[in-house]
Amino acid sequence: MWYSETLSYLHTTNLVVIAAYAALITVIFLVIVKLYTWMTTGVYRGTTIMKGKVVIVTGCNSGIGKETAKDLAKRGARVIMACRNMETGSKARDEIISYSGNSDVVLMQLDLSSLNSVRQFAAKVNKQESRLDVLVNNAGVANTFGKKITEDGLELTMATNQYGPFLLTHLLLPLLKKTASSRIVIVASDLYKLAKLNLAKPNPTNQLPAYLYYVSKYANIMFSMELARKLKDSNSGVTCNCLHPGIIDSGIWRNVPFPLNLGLQLIVKTMFKTTEQGAQTSIYLTVSEDVAKTTGKYFKDCKEGSLRSDVLDEGNAKKYWEICEKLVKLQPNDPRP
């Protein structure tokens, strides 16, 4: 009797010891990963003042967009916050003003999934602003399984992340060209590597939105590179660059449903960048004089990064550009690069 009880005790003790070791190893691993993330995160430390300059940041009621707007407001820029949700946008605006001491922060409604909303927003900006120094195409949406079609017949993820920004950029080009040495900054992602854009199905309404997020980032890069080429060829003086902000601890993960979200928060909080860290490359491309003349490049952690050859294919980019023009119903009298 005592023998079997002893064996049972030893077995239980061993399991506890193994569990403790496993927990310790997990904690050490997460700490190492977090330390690595912190050590390899680019930080822009420039002190450039933006007073007198006008910047539009889309999707800045939260996440890296909000952090970008905060930094630019602190530098004295007139910041136009282009947000879909005016309630959360208003709270973010108050916070940015309080943080920066700059009251020249304007909140305007913009739903990038609606072509009509994009046109209304652009018309207001073109009417009330005399200059536009930087357009930061930051807004993005990532759904997992919920398929949605917009009022324009476009798949929601692609409409918000690619087609809305494509139209918005076109409509604001005259103001950007009017302003000396203006910039367009497009927030893409290294997650483009998980997908490929199918030119035969540019509006993939039957595919999973989770996958289409990656497709939209692929599209962002193609759009950015072709736009940079067209702007350079026309001697516009406008630059265009895109970036990977990193994998961020932001609200974008709230759309991950149960049970896929189990344990996700632990991973997000321990392994992903903070929104402040994620905003650094956007700020760098918006502010730094080091990239004032740089165009058609891809950046990560405040330095130039590399791209796969397929996403750089100029022939595909030109074809996709024409497809985008049709999908956003670009009119003959609408601005072109």
Image (tube, rainbow, N blue to C red):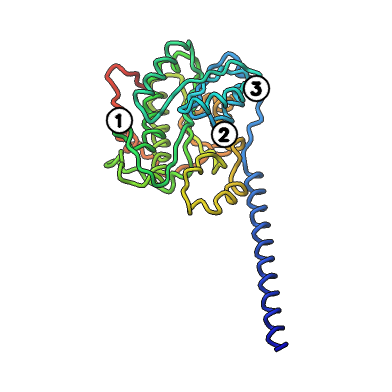
Q: Closer to the N terminus: mark 3 or mark 2?
A: 3
Q: Which residue is depicted at the point 43% across and 48% down? A: 194
Q: Quadrant of residue 154?
A: top left
Residue 264 position in % (x across, y down): 54, 51
Query: Looking at this view, is 48 or 330 the one in front?
Result: 330
Residue 127 position in % (x across, y down): 42, 11
Q: CA distance from mark 2 to mark 1?
A: 33 Å
Mark 2: amino acid? Thr
- State left or right for residue 2 relative to residue 81: right
Return the residue at label 3. Answer: 98
Q: Which residue is depicted at the point 35% across and 39% down? A: 148
Q: In the figure, 20 relative to 139: above or below?
A: below
Q: Closer to the N terminus: mark 2 or mark 1?
A: 1
Return the residue at label 1. Answer: 152
- State left or right for residue 185 relative to residue 36: left
Mark 1 packing: few (<14 Cα in 10 Å), some, or many (20+)?
some
Q: Residue 281 — which label? A: 2
Q: Quadrant of residue 122?
A: top left
Q: CA distance from mark 3 to mark 2?
A: 24 Å
Q: Quadrant of the N terminus?
A: bottom right
Mark 1: amino acid? Asp
Mark 3: amino acid? Ser
Q: In the figure, 231 relative to 63: above or below?
A: above
Kindly check if marks 2 and 1 are in contact, taking CB atoms under 8 A apart as contact: no
Residue 146 position in % (x across, y down): 38, 44
Residue 142 position in % (x across, y down): 44, 41
